[in-house]
Amino acid sequence: MKKSFIAMAISVMVSAAAVGCTSADVQEQGAINTETTQEATEEVTQEATEQATEETSEEASTDTASSEDSSSDESSEAATEGASNDSKSEASDADASTAKADDKKDTASSDNEYDSTIDKLLKTKAVTPDKEELLSDMARVVTISNVLDKNGVFSKADNNSKARLRNQVIRYSTYENSELKKIASLKTGEEDYKTVVSVEDAKKIWLDFYGEDDFNPGEYEDVKDGKIYYSFGDGEQVALASHCEYHEDDEYFLFTGPVFEGHNINDGTFKGYADILFKKNTDSVFGFTAIYGRYRKDTVKVASVTTSSELAASKGKNYSGKNLIDGDYSTVWCEGAKGEGVGETITLKLDKKQSVNGVQICNGYTASYDLHHSNGVLTDIEVDFGNGKKVSVDLFAHDIENETVEDLVEDNLNHIELDEPVETDTITIKITGAKKGAKYDDTCVSEIMVY
């Protein structure tokens, strides 16, 4: 499969609605043709953060004088000074509160403005920018730094998020084949197996990249004698953004594309569509600055599922095709044909004809280790996306005793994608190879997502 955008990510959390079940006891087979309509709606929520203002008070003490007149005078002076200090303190607190409120208002205003700009650009025709490779490198830096996990203006992100972004900016500015390195021309050295960059050079590239050069030395960066020391380790998880598109107007470039995170380039959890906004900037060495980003949790809605067969319901459990699109990794479709189900099909009818990049399949019965290990899994499939676009692929399945359900799901996510998106309203998946389980030969699939 063609992978247009592969990068290293710092961390990933797999979120799956998975419920553990008892061991499988499903041997009765009945070939049932079924069509199920399932509508899923997603509601995107955004957390709002509140800021609390702290009030500080000063306590003044005065020495007691021997004379009543002196005491009275000093008390009067202390009272006057105290009143003055109280007045100044209240004014200072008010100014600080106003400043914080203004900052919060400005950020909200910027977010709304940038979201609106992105939405407008998404409606325009995709373009191929002159600096496509550079934009791709910069977008890669943003996605793998996980700064998109909290939508917003990059220069106003929390310090931890910005530190991850700063780290990846420097990291990719040292990669031999990166366009970022060619343009940035960052001077680096090496001491004690660490990459060394001068603070001034680092601040310049940060300012050019995301519009800010402010940081606290020693908080996240190892700074000594005007130098920053970096240790870039291996073994992090892979982030994949594929089928990237670019949109442009007089002021902005927009990068957009689906992003997955996982251990290998063929699996991973769907993070959403990364929308990264770049402002054209002649003062930046890159020619533009990354200013805002978000994840868009858009997936293609599947209106109905038709399967060539399904296992008959048993002991209160059903194995219907509707389980493939219910968003629940503890429910499952099991084919109902004799043997491992080679030749059986799953047909997804979309809610309308639209652009499709690929599908993600959760292979096997992932409600628990026992269920996954006991039942069959897919090994090979053919996916007919319509319009003459067919893809034949090998699938993997994996389980480890005592692993969590979340890990079991992540270990069995396969995504199958086209070299180029296709306009379609129907996708048919045919089983061309399967492996029986430790107890049963019923081939199972827990979930399918179209993107």
Image (spheres, helix red, strand yellow):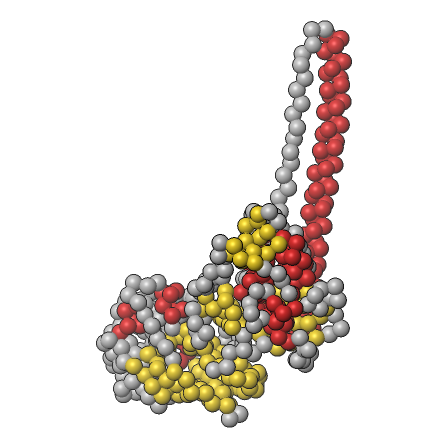
Q: Quadrant of residue 379?
A: bottom left
| Vertical arrangement, residue 142 with respect to residue 67, above or below | below
- Tell me: 138 left or right of 238: right
| Vertical arrangement, residue 129 with respect to residue 161, above or below | below
- Tell me: 396 left or right of 298: left
Residue 192 in sight: yes
Residue at the image position 69 percent from the left and 48 percent from the top? 101
**x then y, percent, for residue 364:** 34, 75
- Tell me: 203 left or right of 345: right
Residue at the image position 62 percent from the left and 65 percent from the top? 293
Q: Quadrant of residue 443?
A: bottom left
| Vertical arrangement, residue 256 with respect to residue 209, above or below | below
**x then y, percent, for residue 151:** 60, 61
Residue at the image position 64 percent from the left and 76 percent from the top? 132
Residue 352 in sight: no
Residue at the image position 44 percent from the left and 76 percent from the top? 266
**Count of numbered marks:** 0
Among all residues in the image, which is located at the extreme left? Answer: 439
**x then y, percent, for residue 450:** 49, 78
Among all residues in the image, which is located at the extreme top? Answer: 67
Q: Quadrant of residue 429?
A: bottom left
Nearest the eye: 153 or 143: 143
Among all residues in the image, which is located at the extreme bottom? Answer: 388
**x then y, percent, for residue 218:** 56, 47
